[in-house]
Amino acid sequence: MSEAPTLRSILLRTVPVWLGLVALLAVSVLLAYRPLGPWNAALAFGIAGTQALLVAVPFMRLDTANALDRLTAACGLFWLAILFTLTLADVFARLAEG
Amino acid sequence: MTATGEPSPALREPSPPLREPAPLLRESAPSLREPWHDLGFAPADALARQRAGASFGMWIFIASEVLFFGALFLFYAALRAEHPEAVAAAARETNIVYGTANTALLLTSGLLAAIAARAAEVPALRRLVLVCLLLTAGLGLAFLIVKGFEYREDIRENLVPGPGFKLADRPTQLFFGFYWFATAVHGIHLAIGIGLVTRLAWKGWRAPDFLATSPQVEVALLYWGFVDMVWIVLYPALYLVGRAG
Amino acid sequence: MSPHIAQSPTALADPDELALGLPESYLAAGHTLGSWLTTTDHKRIAILYGLSITLFFFLGGAAATAVRLELFTPEADFVGSDTYNKLFTLHGVIMVWFFLIPSIPTTFGNFLLPLMIGARDLAFPKLNLVSWYLNLGGGLLAAVAVLAGGIDTGWTFYVPYATVFSDTAVSVAVLGVFVAGFSTIATGVNFIATVHLLRAPGMTWFRLPLFVWAMYTTSLIFVLATPVLALTLLLVLAERAFGLPIFDPARGGDPILFQHLFWFYSHPAVYIMILPAMGVISEVITCFSRRVVFGYTFMVYALVAIAVIGFFTWGHHMFTSGMSPYAALLFSFLSFIVAVPSAIKVFNWTATLYRGQIGFESPMLYALGFLGLFTVGGLTGLFLASIPIDVHVQDTYFVVAHFHYIMVGASVSAYFAGLHLWWPKITGRMYPETWAKFAAILMFFGFNLTFFPQFIAGYLGMPRRYHVYPPEFQVWNVLSSSGAAVLAVAYLMPLGYLTWSVFFGARARNDPWNATGLEWRTTSPPPRDNFLGRVAVLGPPYDYHPAGSPPTQDQPHLPTQESQA
Amino acid sequence: MMQRFVPAWLMPEAASTQAAKVDAIFFGLTVISAAIVLVVVGLVVTFAIRFRRGSKADRGALPSVVSREFEIGWTAATLFVFLFIFWWAASAEIGAYTPPKDAIEIHVVANQWMWKTQASNGAREINELHVPVGAPVRLMLTSQDVIHSFYIPAFRLKRDAVPGRQTETWFQATKTGTFHLMCTEFCGTDHSRMLGRVIVMEPQDYAAWLSAQPEGDDLAHAGERLFTERGCAGCHAPGSTIHAPDLAGLWGKTIPLEGGRTVTVDAAYIRDSILQPARDIAAGYAPIMPSYAGLLTDGEVQELTAYLRALGAGPRTVRSPGVPPLSSRVPGSARERSPAMVPGAPVADTPAPAGPAVGP
Ligand code: HEA
Ligand code: HEA
Ligand code: CUA
Ligand SMILES: [Cu+2]
């Protein structure tokens, strides 16, 4: 939003991100075939989280967005955390009881 | 304000120069819409505020959608916690080739959408924007087509829950319940996105300064980004489970 | 006018002081049906909502009447089991999603939010209209579900009953609620953006009227809770209509998970139903005791706290469901915490009365009733939050009484308080005050007669959703049913005299209650553009008396005097 | 304590150890709440009258410090009261979670719209439950169709019966007598008629009642029917062409498994054999038995188990089904005995089959 961007500046800020995204995709496919026990899931979703972050921050321009938009995005995640934490607390506790 | 909340003259703001009840500015800036035209700003500022309003509105909606899909992923998390083996066995049946290709398609469309959103601010780059928009929508369409092939294969392989389902273990059907539901809901979102982006391209083609002034560009492309993110998380959930061993 | 107006904390001409030549009112801007159905004016949309909500209220009320009629005796003597089950489901679904949740936000919220912050309209006027159509569409789908044979799942749609066993029109009804849910999300987005971006110059966050704060916090819940319900209902639909295995335990699904998802929405939803009511009550109490609200900042924090902490307590609906005992204790604890800000609000309202100039016009009668009924309803909520007691009274009439005390005793009273307070502003007409007072008092007594006996029946062990019941509970049900008859009369009265007043009522002044607040600084009814000139705000809200001095002797103009004037 | 203050017709009968605790908390909360309501309503009414419009009361301005102090004061006070109530209620609850070790175990299976109970000593009942006074009783609940909830008001006891899961609770009756048993989770058409009674007896009466019970008959009969209906007989019947073990006399035996292990045939083993046949293969047989997971409800597995048990335990012939429809020996006809509290309620001994419905 500051200086009028040029084609070059735009490509410089987006294409590397895309390369990163595709590389992460490749990594996650490769890792999926490696028997790592519980780490498989953790890595797969860890990579997915990173990728989502890469889309949200540079692509959807959260980095240059105003504070309000960023706060809104954070709120979404915070409430999601409430939903997951409290529900899974019960689900896992029930599983542990058998 | 004092503790009692009562107004005290000392704390009142020095009254600003009283503006005359001016005639409404509705005509002055044509692309200003209803409530934004009369905030007492210069037209350029008002326009910026209207734009900010549109993307703020979209971000609120995205936060809402985060919980929508979040609930879906919660269902998945519980499913996986309760039936880990069945989920692994079932997920092995999904077609990772189609899935990975589709992920790559969407990631690329995300790149084009991001380029379009940035370039839209520069009137000189209008052609680039149009091309990027069309490609974005095209890649989205390609995703749906690939998905169609994948669905056809799934149906052939009896991966639709119900009698005659391919796998014996009952909870494997739950995984495929999730698979069909999640991909369908994501597909609907994507189809809406394709519609929005195509519409932008159409409007931008018809009206030369539409892309540079309308807040709709930013809004539609934010939505596109979000639909992208949903798939990014769905991908490991559907395709990468149970591949090892 | 009075010196009080001269101190008004706005830099806006008081229309009473303006010469003639006022712009036409929003009501006069177009008389065709088309001009209403395509309007993007927040005030007109509010009226549209008002009409649909009234319709749904009486539809839900008719179902409640049938329920109470049937429960007069322990036997089944009026309808069969299946019909009874459909009746209370219809009652709950309509009352919750098509009446109470949209009630205050979409009528008064739509009408007043822009006025109160000095804006010309909501941030996204077209979205606002879309939202009304979605609401109506959802309502029609629900109506179709009723015509297609009704729904018998209860408003909670518990699985696997709702997905696998019920053979009624669940899918259509669920779709209706889903669509209506999107309507409230749209409203929420609109309100939040409006409050953030369209406040008039000088209208800082801590100068917002409490009603605006209530709308803002309600919208947070709209936006963050409703999507979870939407998804859950889609899952139900997928399982029921498309046969996908989702929650069905016979196929390994987890019905308790459904309850988590449902209550993640539906507990915050009960705060959707009470926060707007609290906003209305705050406005009414300050206005009719002529005092600045006690502890304004604490009132704001309390609203925010209820909205946020309200998201942490949903599990208290599942204490007996076989949820893990540790989770149950956690949810019980959090339920107590969320009650603290409610207490703050009750005490602050009470303190606002202290040293006021209290008048007893009908909005104030409703507000005083609200205080008592909300306290009783809320305190019984604490009984329910205590696990051992809940194990006994869960799904008995004790719970039914608890939520009617809050939803009917408190929220519906607040709706009527707001209706009477802002009626002159909305329609430009005064209503007959004597009738209104009588209806308010009748409602209070009818209400207590209907629902207090249910606490006792519930503790004695009468389960809810029971078509026939052991005869020892009959005495309480007879009391309750008679109360419902009184209540029906009391609710029908405003329908009559308010309709009458639209045509025959005296013309209302611009500020008949001599209240503060921007909405009174314009004509009654307001012009299309809301204000005559541009708004600037110079001081905090509720400027009923200069600091350090007692409340002015300035009293609301009695409507009865007005009609002579 | 409560009896002294509250008239009997306002209190539900209290007949379990938990009931007394719940009533105490309820009474305490009522007193606290009444006090709060009195304070709030009292203040509102006093202020409303004293400061009514035009009254002569003093209306000097409030000192500006008051507000904050008040706010903090009553926030803290409320929080304190709430924490106290939570602690009180929670401590009563925590104590009630784990049943004593020596509790009588009773399985409860709910379906639309009846309760089936079976004690570990074999006594089976429909819509009724006999228990001795003063002994802890542990309930294990499940459901065959939708969620139901097992509610005995006099015991202040309620627990949902959830299909596909087992939930637990326990009680200890303190009074003999007959008490309501009701379903409190909405479960369809006859939800309000899904009633029964709990009969608390002196221990010696209970023992007498128990010894008069036939053992597990009904269950075995149902299991016998299922055995042919579900095709078990196709493989396991003595004349079958398929090579599968004869199950008669199997119960309680120790049999060899493929891979050299041995196992004693009990309920758990039979359950596993039916639901996960691939796990333990009987020596000398091919693993061709299909899994019945998801095809048989928990109740049906129980019935099959009972049948196999009957095949093994007693004489090889099982009495033909249908002779004593109810295992209960309470005097009177079925109509008098069953959910007799509700006038006109049908006796839900043979409920209409409630199959999965295909809805619009
Ligand atoms: C507007 C609606 C609304 C509101 C605001 C509330 C508010 C509360 N509710 Fe209620 N509730 C419902 C609507 C509502 N509820 C509905 C519809 C159901 C049933 C759903 C169904 O099953 O169909 C239900 C059911 C329900 C249950 C589950 C019952 C069951 O099914 O077993 C519980 C359990 O904890 C509960 C608790 C509470 C609590 C703790 C509050 C608190 O927020 C209350 C806080 C308020 C106060 C406490 C009063 C004011 C305070 C004071 C005056 C302070 C002084 C007090 C002290 C110092 C002690 N509610
Ligand atoms: C906003 C919410 C709201 C409102 C306002 C009400 C209002 C009322 N409710 Fe409702 N109620 C619920 C929400 C609400 N209820 C919910 C969520 C449930 C749970 C449902 C479930 O279990 O799933 C419930 C359940 C419920 C039950 C329990 C049913 C059962 O469990 O078996 C009862 C029983 O007495 C009852 C009674 C009443 C009464 C007498 C009113 C009165 O206040 C209504 C007064 C209004 C009128 C009386 C209308 C007057 C108009 C007429 C009479 C015109 C009639 C016209 C024709 C016949 C053409 N309600
Ligand atoms: Cu079984 Cu209700
Ligand atoms: Cu709740």
Image (cartoon, rainbow, N blue to C red):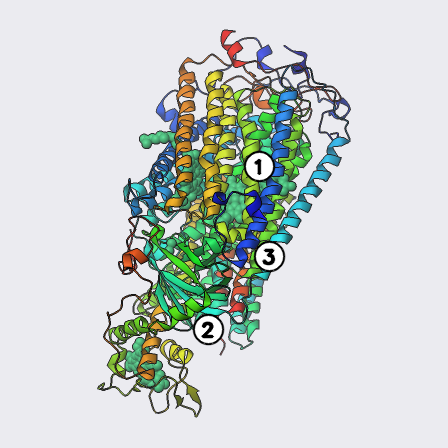
Q: Which residue is mark 3?
A: D92
In the displayed structure, would residue C425 be above or below residue D304? Answer: above
Q: Residue at x 50, y 32 (%)?
A: C104
Q: Which residue is mark 1?
A: C375
In the displayed structure, would residue D299 be above or below residue D352? Answer: below
Tag in front: 2 or 3: 3
Tag in front: 1 or 2: 1
Amino acid under label 1? Thr
**Quarter the N terminus of chain C occupies:** top right
Ligand 3 lies in quarter: bottom left
Q: Are marks 2 and 3 in contact (CB under 8 Å)?
A: no
C89 relative to C508 in the view: left or right = left
Does label 1 point to a residue whose CB lies under 8 Å from ligand 1? yes
Camera-nearest residue between C313 and D316: D316
Label 2 vs label 3: CA separation? 39 Å
> Dot 3 falls on which chain?
D
Label 1 vs label 2: CA separation? 51 Å
Badge 3, how many Cα within 10 Å: few under 14, some, many 20+?
some
> Dot 2 falls on which chain?
B
> Is residue D92 something that shows in the picture?
yes
Q: Which residue is mark 2?
A: B85
